[in-house]
């Protein structure tokens, strides 16, 4: 109901006349007042100048160096491999320790390994270093500070990796080049201001979740839509052209010309829109048991990676998540059973639940197969729901995000002892590779 503004007549509120005050501004008081105003303005200018001068901005550097006390492994060439991931994290952790212990430790933000390549004496490392310094600082001056910190750390000889000093190179890069380099890595989230988005920033089909906080928080999330019928399912971007989703999403039709995919935190308007050119449904998908509920959809034209659209990492098939691991599910699905699709992307934190618990007679009574993964809470309340199908269940490993589940099925939404059931992506890692080579 609309409330109209209340109107008062002049008769109810007669005009009040005030007596003139006697003159206050004698010359002395006027002089003191003027001095006070000047002092206040001076202080204000000082404060503004301080904040303008101290306004920080991002500085990026490409670091390359040779590590001589490790040998190159073939799997270092595969950025989704466990070997590359583990070695990269060790090197990134070393960099973090070097800079956090330095005098300007608070200025270091993050590092990301871009590549590990073979060298006669060991392994060549290429990585991006990110810093925040006052905008008045120069790129070259900060470069010298960074180099000085690195060279001092090499002198201590207490690093886990032996870095060849002559091989160390530091090159300033702009944010476009930095983003381009990071695009070679999967699962990295960036804010609109080109700074990393840490896992801690994300908390709470999505029942009892919350609207996603910002563009780029879940940049791999896609909406699969039937032309003329709107949103049907979620999906996850795993390359420039391929989406990973659920087989049951294509029960109505497998004709790719009937489908489109959109990206961004809202369905309307979408940030990016693409037609679908090819659909691959698992050959052994069983509608009755929900087994092998996995499919791939190829876009007719590739998407460019950015802060808003980015691919998620596929996990190594050996990845095992213990029960109660914190994972996130996202989607545009309903927030109550059989409710409407949400235009704004929602997210929820849930926990993995062991298959033995999920297969108890009072839970799913043996229906959970090795290709399935349970996640949620035994008390219910937080869950995926209708319309979230095909969307991602993701796991954070040192601020690199991996898709570990695909929203598949469940009894109703958010009921006690009826957690969400997801397709276990690690079980289909070889199937994905056999179909699209990644």
Image (cartoon, helix red, strand yellow):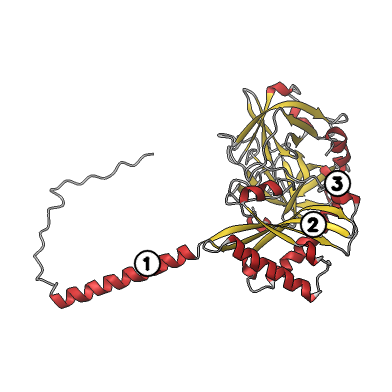
Give the residue pinned by disc 3: 359
Please give the name of the residue rendered at 77% of the width and 27% of the height, measured from the top-left corner.
279
Please give the name of the residue rendered at 84% of the width and 47% of the height, measured from the top-left corner.
78
In the rendered view, does 4 fall on the left or right side of 373?
A: left
Residue 93 point in image, percent of width and height: 76, 64
Residue 99 point in image, percent of width and height: 69, 68
Distance from the alpha carbon under mark 3 to that under mark 2? 46 Å
Residue 203 seen: no
Q: Are marks 3 and 2 in contact (CB under 8 Å)?
A: no
Residue 5 seen: yes
- The mark closer to the camera, 3 or 2, is 2
Residue 288 point in image, percent of width and height: 83, 31
Distance from the alpha carbon under mark 1 to that under mark 2? 47 Å
Q: Is residue 315 above or below residue 200?
A: above
Distance from the alpha carbon under mark 3 to that under mark 1? 68 Å
Q: Quadrant of the C terminus?
A: top right
Q: Which mark is residue 45?
A: 1
Give the residue pinned by disc 2: 125
Q: Residues within 10 Å of mark 3 (few under 14, many from 20)?
A: some
Please give the name of the residue rendered at 75% of the width and 27% of the height, measured from the top-left corner.
250
Q: Secondary structure at mark 3?
A: loop
* First reached walking from the N terminus: tag 3 or tag 2: 2
């Amino acid at each position: 109901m609309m409330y109209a503004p209340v109107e008062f007549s002049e008769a109810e509120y007669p005009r009040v006349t005030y007596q003139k005050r006697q003159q206050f501004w004698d010359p002395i008081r006027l002089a003191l007042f003027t001095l006070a105003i000047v002092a206040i303005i001076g202080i204000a200018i000082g404060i503004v100048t301080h904040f303008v001068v101290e306004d920080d901005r991002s500085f990026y550097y490409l670091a390359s160096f040779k590590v001589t006390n490790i040998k190159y492994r073939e799997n270092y060439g595969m950025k989704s491999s466990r070997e590359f991931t583990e070695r990269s994290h060790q090197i990134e952790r070393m960099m973090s320790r070097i800079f956090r212990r330095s005098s300007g430790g608070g200025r270091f933000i993050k590092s990301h390994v871009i590549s590990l390549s073979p060298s006669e004496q060991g392994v060549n490392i290429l990585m991006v270093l990110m810093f925040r310094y006052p905008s008045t600082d120069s790129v070259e001056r900060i470069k010298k500070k960074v180099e000085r910190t690195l060279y001092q750390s090499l002198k201590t000889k207490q690093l886990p990796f032996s870095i060849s000093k002559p091989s160390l190179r530091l090159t300033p890069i702009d944010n476009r080049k930095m983003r381009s380099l990071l695009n070679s890595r999967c699962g990295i989230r960036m804010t609109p201001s080109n700074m990393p988005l840490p896992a801690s920033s994300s908390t709470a089909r999505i029942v009892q979740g919350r609207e996603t906080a910002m563009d780029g928080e879940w940049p791999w999330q896609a909406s699969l839509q039937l032309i003329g019928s709107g949103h049907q399912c979620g999906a996850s971007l795993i390359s420039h052209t391929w989406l990973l989703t659920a087989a049951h999403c294509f029960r109505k039709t497998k004709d790719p010309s009937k489908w489109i995919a959109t990206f961004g935190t809202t369905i309307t308007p979408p940030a990016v829109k693409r037609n679908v050119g090819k659909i691959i449904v698992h050959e052994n998908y069983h509608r009755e048991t929900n087994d092998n509920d996995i499919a791939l959809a190829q876009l007719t034209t590739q998407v460019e990676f950015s802060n808003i659209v980015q691919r998620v990492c596929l996990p190594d098939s050996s990845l095992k998540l213990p029960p109660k691991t914190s994972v996130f599910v996202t989607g545009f699905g309903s927030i109550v059973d059989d409710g409407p699709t949400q235009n704004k992307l929602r997210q929820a934190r849930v926990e993995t639940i062991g298959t033995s618990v999920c297969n108890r007679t009072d839970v799913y009574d043996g229906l959970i197969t090795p290709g399935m993964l349970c996640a949620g809470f035994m008390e219910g309340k937080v869950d995926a729901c209708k319309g979230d199908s095909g969307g991602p269940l993701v796991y954070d490993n040192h601020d690199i995000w991996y898709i570990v589940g695909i929203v598949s099925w469940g009894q109703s939404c958010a009921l006690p002892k009826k957690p969400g059931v997801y397709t276990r992506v690690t079980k289909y890692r070889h199937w994905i590779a056999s179909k699209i080579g990644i």
